[in-house]
Every structure is written in structure tokens, then in C-alpha cells.
Amino acid sequence: MDLINIKSPTDLKGLSIAELTDLTAQARQALMTKVSEHGGHVGPPMGAAEMIMALHYVFNSPVDKIVYDVSHQSYVHKMVTGRALAFLDHDHYDDVTGYTDPTESEHDFFNIGHTSTSISLASGLATARNLKGDSENIIAIIGDGSLSGGEAFEGLDYAATLDSNMIIIVNDNDQSIAENHGGLYRGLRELRETNGESSNNIFKSLGLDYRFVADGNDLETLINVFEDVKDINHPIVLHVVTQKGKGYAIAEQHKEAFHWTMPFDLETGKLKEEANGPTYVGTIANYLMDQIKADPMVVAIIAGTPGGFGFNAKWRKEAGKQYIDVGIAEEHAIAMSSGIAKNGAKPVFSVFSTFLQRTYDQLVQDLSVNNNSAVIINHDASVYGMNDVTHLGFFDIPMLTSIPNLVYLAPTNNEELLAMTKYAVHQHEHPIAIRVPVGKFISTGVPDTTDYSILHKSEATRHGERIALLGLGNFYHLANQVADELAKDGIDATVVNPKFASGLDEELLEELKANHSVVFTLEDGVVEGGWGQRVASFYGLSAMRVKNYGIAKEFHDRYDAAELLRENGISVEQIVNDVKCMLR
Amino acid sequence: MDLINIKSPTDLKGLSIAELTDLTAQARQALMTKVSEHGGHVGPPMGAAEMIMALHYVFNSPVDKIVYDVSHQSYVHKMVTGRALAFLDHDHYDDVTGYTDPTESEHDFFNIGHTSTSISLASGLATARNLKGDSENIIAIIGDGSLSGGEAFEGLDYAATLDSNMIIIVNDNDQSIAENHGGLYRGLRELRETNGESSNNIFKSLGLDYRFVADGNDLETLINVFEDVKDINHPIVLHVVTQKGKGYAIAEQHKEAFHWTMPFDLETGKLKEEANGPTYVGTIANYLMDQIKADPMVVAIIAGTPGGFGFNAKWRKEAGKQYIDVGIAEEHAIAMSSGIAKNGAKPVFSVFSTFLQRTYDQLVQDLSVNNNSAVIINHDASVYGMNDVTHLGFFDIPMLTSIPNLVYLAPTNNEELLAMTKYAVHQHEHPIAIRVPVGKFISTGVPDTTDYSILHKSEATRHGERIALLGLGNFYHLANQVADELAKDGIDATVVNPKFASGLDEELLEELKANHSVVFTLEDGVVEGGWGQRVASFYGLSAMRVKNYGIAKEFHDRYDAAELLRENGISVEQIVNDVKCMLR
């Protein structure tokens, strides 16, 4: 049986173990080939290949419902639910997303990309099933790494109260993106080492039935276990041990590098295009390491994604107690940061914008109400950041800038990034977040000596008249490009680098009134509730006209950034055109 | 020794057990008297009285640091740290807040009012202590109810990795605000019933040391235990069984009613002022119960606070499986709601605005990215809501209205509230949140027949010229009052009921341009990132002038709503005055 001929899980039903084994090998081969050419997750889907094959062999999807946590392990699921072509033919690679997606298939129940959600989502499906009087199996698959997020615990706690079918598969490959952190993992290790017999069993302690499966990469074992628990009348945890990256020796060995990767050479595992040259991430990482060495009070905090921020294994070791990976536990990261700052040390939490959302209440309550001077380095907060609908990072400005006390800085180049980070790390007045620039690395070569303790002070860097272009963070350069174009036509625009997203420089805005009639705000994010609308509000009663550029409030999946911006009227050409129309 | 003479915990040090017992009785008496006259929390501080007295007897605060979860149990802590007068003299009742507050005392480390945060905050203090090379004791006190929140689990998971002093007291009174829900509580009960010997021990399963203390209301026992663990060199959980409301028989019996209460008669326990007359909360509750009876697919979801939404014990029983209290687990509540809606049932999650913040990422990812038609009834989203700095509910508009797909409705009276709720419950198109009006109950007596499936359609209810007053939700009435006043001076203002907070009625806004020159937006919440600024942005390039009324971005504690509004220029008089100035 060829993988390409599997049109739905029913095509698996009559197969022998040998045939299934062969199909799994085909799936792995397809997966490796595609990801090596296209980039994507390697370790999670490779390790879960037998599990997914066995699930679809035993259960009856989509009547029985499988919910994947993060869903980056669902590639083989996609292959056996009618989407094999997207893994076998490179012209069709982009037919599918890297996560489950209900618009692709009735076998996918949620668009999911953040961790720790599967048990709650699945228990919702189970609750509705019970209300309807139906009886299908509901299955949640969650990795050991994802268990460190509080939402997973809340889900387990609730699932334990269901007196009906619910199968929770803990896919334990003893690895998060990097190594696991937390007391939880001591318990899981004990369970692995005792064949599930250890009395320190978090699942049982929550009242859940429990079964240990030592070989989670053996098809026959899995099929037998799944047949045993199919139609079970109460919730059960299957603790299944798998090997991350299974079947690709280089990924088995280099688990962190091959969790997710850019295109690579299958034979050597080497990236096809090595990143080189300086980066903003590198600037922050180098500065933080220097600070860690210079000051025992500085502590770098990360929630499960050290690689994204330059903290490789060697650095992590070097930083010692001044480096803390809390697991995928952003809520704890922020609350703990508040406590660290309160007791006189300096926490610096690096996070991707899309995941900072996971800790909104802690940002408000634990941190900002208490006005403790923790630092948040917010990465990929940009239309140019991750572009999966589950990983958008450009909703940060409305989220962060409506929180009192929290200062949000928006550097436009490497020198500003460094100066702002230095200021943030050395001050003791406010919680401060920094919106790390995204895109082309821009360095002025001239150290930034701005005193950022003067909050919400902007800088007019180009003095013109009639037209003022206020370009926040990343989009400061866009403002300059527009001004350059306008200059060609003899239009002399003012350009402002606002520097702060959390407030307005009202003095400068007042001054602009003297010889300007239109202000254009440009921000690299959602426009509604954003920074520019505050400027519009400020000028509301004046004669100043204001146009706010930003992305309209909508979800987008795997978009092209330049195209999305154009759709929102944001390109040098369009803005220049708008300005000219306005001046006519 | 009289309580009033205790100026700091050092005054406790030399006392005998008999004297401490007497002081505890005085503290309880003071607490009951104050709360009966003033309102406040009863059950939590009464149950923790001996524990707090013993802690301050054994440990050396503020060098040793005690962090309270929610901190509503800290009244006795305040009494023995120099603030007894605030509990003994009714002229001084308002000298202290109902929560810990660092501006009040060096013995208070955080302003805390949301649950599940203490372990993370305390582990931050411990982490900084370790970096500094200090050696004080760090103590977190968390109630069993608060353990259901994911942040508490994240904190436990991290605390287990500390190889240094940290004392986590689980204050187990077998009660949340209402009864406990979740598998966790089965485990805690087993531990209580086995004197801590049950093998189902969540704390041990996370690798934490553990000690069971059966009588948590016995001073001598507590002192001995605390002396044993003082200066311990690793993290330990003390599982201490206490009685909620201990010492006030009526509170011991009616645990839910006396978790927090308005002023009451000490002898009978009866509220001094019974609420009467119809309420918005009642409208929703009645409608939900009717729906639950009529449709087996409707399910009411609550995160630990049923009483606030009219779901008393009788109703909860009556609703059966169609009522789910998830514990204090808002993240799970939203994710599960998404799953319930996905599988064809209708979840209606009632929540206080301040706690909806706890589930921001689930609102975005689990719910809105997936566009499932769950309903959120958002209570106390108003300047007139809870006014403790830890419980502010007026930051909801920026938070919710920058999320795509999520529809946010803002009714202005009882009929609209009912019509909007009906629409939300019966539709299958969008996740919908409803901003329940706060304040005076207003009923038109005329059923609202608006078709709310036409999204973001506003209604001009008064047609004037030059001036348009757009009053969102609660503030629609303010707009009308302003219009009434203006009419007295012959100024004929237009009044608009926007009805939707999540978008603009651009057609209506366009029409206003014809014969209006100034638009005033009025919203009952923070102005920055709010609804009115979208209106300002909409009109940015036009000749229309716009003024946005709302609360400036700042934290406020125990404020007077009318006064805070006046400080922000929001009163009929001030707005009328602004309008007249503008027209001059």
C-alpha cells in the first residue's frame, strides 16, 4: 500500500501490522524529505508517527475525535486523513499548514499552535458529547513539555471529574523544545524508570486512571493498548514513552535543534542557509550574557524557548543560576519576575510576542499593579514575525499599552535596542517591555545616548512642514522612506521616532500643530486599540488631521507580510500617494 | 496583652501560649465586629487566625517574608503588624485595604487580589534571595480553592526545583468560595482522611517534601510545626487543615455566604441591607435557568464564583450537568467552552471582568482563532464595579476589542441585555461577549426586537445637529442626560446608542458628517485603546472633531466612582460645559 493511496483512515482498517509498519516508514520518509526541503517541525511528528498510525487504525475518526496539543506533531495525521500529497509532492507542500486546521479536514477539530490546550479543548468536546447523549471516543494527545503550562493542569483537574469516556495520551519523550524543567519531570522520570509503578504519580493524585506504555514507538503495542481503552467509560491517562525525532538519527541525537528547523541537508543535518551577520536577537543575548557575568543580580528567564533567543546549551550552563527556564509557564515567569524584582534582583524575561499573551493577567496584577521593575524582551512583535494564524505576534500594542505602569519601548535600530535594554536593566522604577525590531538589521554605528528615564519622549529626526510621519519602532524606517520619496517631489515632511509605544509625547504633538496639517501614524501591528489611535484621539478637537496606518483587526494565516501590508494600504508607494492626494 | 498594643510582630515573641490564644480571640472578635459593620471577607481570615499568629510568633517578618494568596486572609496579619487600630476603631476601618499592600507596611510584599499567584511570587523572592546569598525564610500561604488555578501549578512545579528554603502552606479548609471542583480535591480529601498518608499526593508527585498538619486551628501545634521547618534547606509543603469561618458559628455553617459579605447582624448573620428589586444579574440568571430547562444543549459555566451570578446551591443542583463550576480556572473555562461549542452545544461562561483577564490567550487562540460560538457574560466591567486596585474591571474594552472574530456587545438597559443574550445564545456564528450593565437598573418595559446578527449596527435615538453624543453601554444614559441639559439651552444634540464595542457603525458615522461638527464618545472604562479612540481614528481625516471621554490609564484603589469620573472630566456638568465651550 502506498501512502499516496490512503485517502482516509478507513483505508488503514484492513491492513496488517507489516503493511502499517511499511506505511509508517513511508510517512517518516515523506516527512523528513518535506521538512528538509521546506522547514518545519521534525522531532514531534517523527516521534508520534506510530502513535498516530495506531490511533487511526483503532479509532474511527472523525466520529471519534483526536485533539493534538500544539498540533505540530500532526503531520502523519494529515497524511492519513487525505492530505498525503502535501507531504509527497513539493508543489503541494503549502496545501497544508503546520498545525491542525478545521478548514482543511473534518478530522481536524481546532486551529492550535500554543501549548497546553488539548485537554481543555477535548474535555469541551466530551462535555458536549455527554449533553447530546452521544458516545464517541474523545482523545487528547499532549507532550510532556506541554504539561508544564497551567492550562494543561486545569484541564487535567477538570477531566478527572468526567464520569465518561476521555482518553488523555501523555506523549512523553522526556524533552520539551529544550530540556524539561520543573518538579513534574522528576515525577515523570520516576514513572518511566519504574514502568509506571512509582507512587509519585501526578495523574493518579488527581484521581485519574493511569496506564503506562513503555514502548510508544511500537505499533503492535499501541494498537493493543488503544483497543483495550477504546470506549472506556471513564477518563484515563495513557503515559506513552516515545523517542523524539525517532527514525532520523540526527534528530534523535540533536533533539533541540530538530524540534523545529529551517530547511536542512538530510544527510548531514546542516542547515541549507546558515544565518550569518549580526541580529537583534544576538545583540540582546550578548548584552544579557555580559550582564550576567558582570552582575550576580541579573537573571535571564525563558519559558521553554531558549534557542530562539540565542541561549544555547553552553551559554545556559555558563549562566548557571542566573539562567532560569521555567518550562512552558509564562504565567509563572511573569509572577516570579515580579517577585525577583521586589527582592532586589533584576529579572529579564525573553519571550515571543504571541506567547506573552499567555500571561496577560500576571502582567496586570502580579507585575504592573505592584510596579516592580522586571524587564520583558518581546520578540517577533511584528507583521514580519511568525505568520501562522496561531502564532501572530502583532496584537501586542493594544494588549500592553492599556496596562498602567508598564512602559513599552519601541526601538528602531540596534543602538536604540541596546540603549533601551541597558536603561531597562539598570532602572528600578517600572516594569518595562521592549519591542525588539524585526526584519533587516539596522545599525547606525553611533551609540544611542538618549535618557530613557524621561518617559514617552519622542524625537523628531527630520524637520519639515505640513506633513508629519510618526513611525513607531520597525515602521520608523518606512516613515523615512516615505519622506525620501516625498522629498523628490519637493514635499518636505517631518519624521518622528516615537520610541515609546505606551504613551504620547504631548509636547511634541502640540508643537507639530504650529506648521503641520496632517499627521500620519505608522505602526507594525493591529491598528484598532493601537498607538496611532491615541494620536488621533489627542488631536481630536484640533484642526490637525490624522491617518492611522496599521493592520485591520483580522486573523491571517501564512500570509505574505508585504502583501498583507499592501492590502492595508501600507507601502511606500501607497502612503506617498495618500499624502499627495491630501495635499492636492 | 491587648491587641491594640501589638505594634509589630516582635511584640508577640515573649508571649505564652495562653496570651497568644487570648490575642487570637481578640483578633477574631475585632475581625467579626469590623466586617459585620463594614463588610469584607469572613471565612478566609477567621480560619487562618491561628496560622498567622503562629507564623509571626515563630518567624521574623519582614526579614522572613510571608506571601498570601489572594491575601483576603491577611486581616490578622495586618493586626499584628502595626495596623490593629484599623480593626478596632471604626473611624479607622478604611485605613487599610482588604488585601496586603506594600504601601501600608513593610510586612506586605505584594498588592494581591487574584488567586493562585502566591507560590510564583514567593519563588521570585526566594530566587532573588539566593542570588543575593541571603538566607531568610520565604513562606507562601495558598488556600485549597486557589490551587485549581494553573498559575499555582506552574508555581509548584518551579518551586520543586529550588534547592533552598521555601515553605508552602496549603491552607486546606475543604472549600473554595463555593464548594471545590476538580480531581485535585479528591486527592486532598484522601490526604485529609489518611492523615497525609495516601499515596495519591500531588505535592510529592511534583517532588516536593510534604508534611500533614491535621489541626490547623491549634496554636501550639502550628508553632511546633513552624519551628521544625524554620530555616529548612529545601522546599516543603505544609498541608494544614483549617476550618473556614472558625470561631463564628454562623460562618462555619454557611461557608459560601460568609466567604465575603456585605455588613451583617452579628447575632443572626442576616445582611443589614437586603438587596431587593430586579437586577441585571437576575435577568441573566433567570434567562439562563429557563434556557437550561428548555434546551439540554445549554450549559452554564462558572469559575468559582456562582454566588455573584445568582447560581445558588438549589439552582446548581437543578441545572445538573448543565451547570459546570470549573474551579478558579478561567483558562480551562474558555478553552472548554470553545470545545463545547465546536461539538454542537452552547456554553455560556459568566465571569467578572477582572478575572476574564486571566484567560486572554485562550480568548484569542482557543476561542477566537477557532471562531466557536461560545458566550461570555462579562460582569462588573465598569468604573462602578469592584473598586479595589486588584479587582478593577474597566480594562476590558482594549483587551477584548482588539481580538478578531470576537463580538462584544454593550447593552444599555434590561431589555437590550435580554435581547442580546438571547441572540448570543441562539447564534452559531461568533464567539460573543456581553458587557452586563452596572449600576441603576433601567428597564424600558418595551421588548428589544433589534436583529443583533447585523453586526456593529448602532442606533441614533435622538436626532439633533452639530453635536453628537455616542454613549457606549452604561454611558448611554449619561449621553442622554447631557442632551437633556443641552436642550434646556436650546442645543439639540444627537444621541447614539452604539450597542457594539467591538466595531464601528461606519455608515452611521458617515451620516453624522452631514450636519454635525463634533462627536463626543463616552465609555465606561479606560480611554486608551478603547472604543472612542476608534471613532477618533475613523474621523481622523475629516472635518469632524472628536472628544473621547473615558478613564485615563492608571491604577486606582478604593476610589469613589463619581469622583474618579469627575477627575477624568466625566460628569453631566463638565460635559455640558465642554460642549458649550466648543460651540462658542
Image (tube, coloured by chain):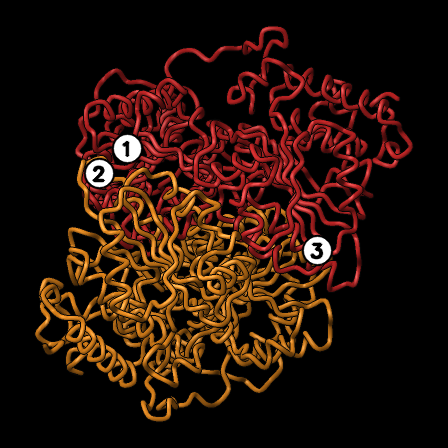
Chain colours: A red, B orange
Whether labels 2 and 3 share one chain = yes
**Quarter of the figure that contains the C terminus of chain B:** bottom left
> Marks 3 and 1: in contact by CB < 8 Å?
no
Q: Residue at x 40, y 31 (%)?
A: A475
In the rendered view, tell whether residue B198 sits above or below residue B97: above
Q: Looking at numbered disc 2 in the image, what kind of residue is underneath it?
A: Ala
B435 sits to left or right of A75: left
Q: Between label 1 and label 3, give the one nearer the viewer.
A: 3
Location of mark 1 (residue): A299
Q: Which numbered marker is on residue A345? A: 2
Q: Looking at numbered disc 1 in the image, what kind of residue is underneath it?
A: Val
> Marks 1 and 2: in contact by CB < 8 Å?
yes
Quadrant hosting residue A554: top right
Quadrant hosting residue A278: top left
Location of mark 3 (residue): A234
> What subunit carries mark 3?
A
Residue A99 drawn at (x, y percent):
64, 34
Measure the alpha-carbon separation of dots 2 and 1: 8 Å
Q: Residue at x 35, y 22 (%)?
A: A317
B251 sits to left or right of A238: left
> What subunit carries mark 2?
A
Disc 3 on helix, strand or loop?
Answer: loop
